[in-house]
Amino acid sequence: DTGVSQNPRHKITKRGQNVTFRCDPISEHNRLYWYRQTLGQGPEFLTYFQNEAQLEKSRLLSDRFSAERPKGSFSTLEIQRTEQGDSAMYLCASRANTGVSTEAFFGQGTRLTVV
Amino acid sequence: AQKITQTQPGMFVQEKEAVTLDCTYDTSDQSYGLFWYKQPSSGEMIFLIYQGSYDEQNATEGRYSLNFQKARKSANLVISASQLGDSAMYFCAMREGYGGATNKLIFGTGTLLAVQP
């Protein structure tokens, strides 16, 4: 399978705990995006990597959130001191080229539930 | 600010009939792209169709076509010959700008389509 892979698929955690999600993009894609999707809403942009450089972060990405993409390959998204409001689907997407025409390929997401 | 509006929270369609899902957008950019994605209950976002702002012809991909009306800033998705497997959430999205920009996607709130046998 050469698609975008996300792990874990589901995560239940207690409020206050730290969680980390992983995204493995399509191997030749240099652009990687993280989105968050809450119930009944469309995905909202969180952050963007071009190769290993994190070039844009949304205001949604509070200080408790950190993302990395070492060596420009896989990426991790960590949430520290989770809150119930962090419960959402976290989607990763990758794409290859610049410009507006190429589609982003999405993973199946990690569904986080904070109890 | 860029915005995507999908005014239909839910739609029903009979199997084998056509259905139109509405999407309007707002942007001040001259160059932009419009996308439709399908999200089944399993969660992944599946790309369906793309329309560029400079494309003069409406995009088509199999049973999917995009009714692009630039002056009205609308990009409606038409699904012909609906199938039971088309039941899913459908999201309209827009990507801004030229190369060098982040080119992130801005999504609407989605339309839940239910295909009835």
Image: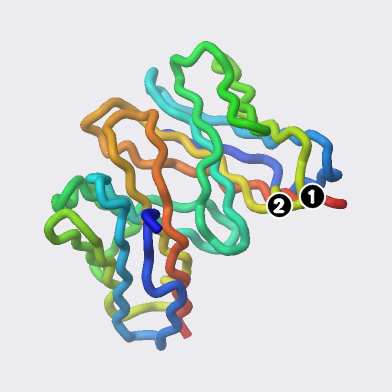
The residue located at (14%, 53%) in the rendering is A52
Q: Nearer the viewer, residue B44 or B89?
A: B44
Task: Using the rendered view, name the quadrant where residue A16 is placed.
Answer: bottom left
Task: Using the rendered view, name the quadrant where residue A99 is placed.
Answer: top left
User: In the structure shown, which secondary structural element does the residue marked by tag 2 occupy?
Assistant: helix
Left/right of residue B101 with respect to residue B46 in the rendered view: left
Which chain does the numbered disc 2 sit on?
Answer: B
What amino acid is at disc 1?
Val
Q: Nearer the viewer, residue A114 or B40?
A: B40
Count of numbered tags: 2
Upstream in the sequence, badge 1 or badge 2?
2
Answer yes or no: do the residues labelled 1 and 2 have beta carbons within 8 Å? yes
Residue at the extreme bottom: A14
Q: Nearer the viewer, mark 1 or mark 2?
A: 2
Residue B56 at x, y = what percent? 52, 11
Residue B53 at x, y = what percent? 45, 20
Image disc number at residue B115: 1
Which chain does the numbered disc 1 sit on?
Answer: B
The residue located at (63%, 28%) in the rendering is B65
Identify whether A92 is placed above or below B98.
below
Residue A54 at x, y = what percent? 18, 51
The residue located at (24%, 61%) in the rendering is A74
Q: CA distance from mark 1 to mark 2?
A: 8 Å
What amino acid is at disc 2?
Gly
User: In the structure shown, which secondary structural element does the residue marked by tag 1 occupy?
Assistant: strand
Residue B15 at x, y = what percent? 83, 44
Residue at the extreme top: B56
How packed mark 1 is, by other alpha carbons closer than 10 Å (few <14, some 14-19, many 20 or more), is many
Left/right of residue B100 with respect to residue B108 in the rendered view: left
Residue highlighted by disc 2: B85
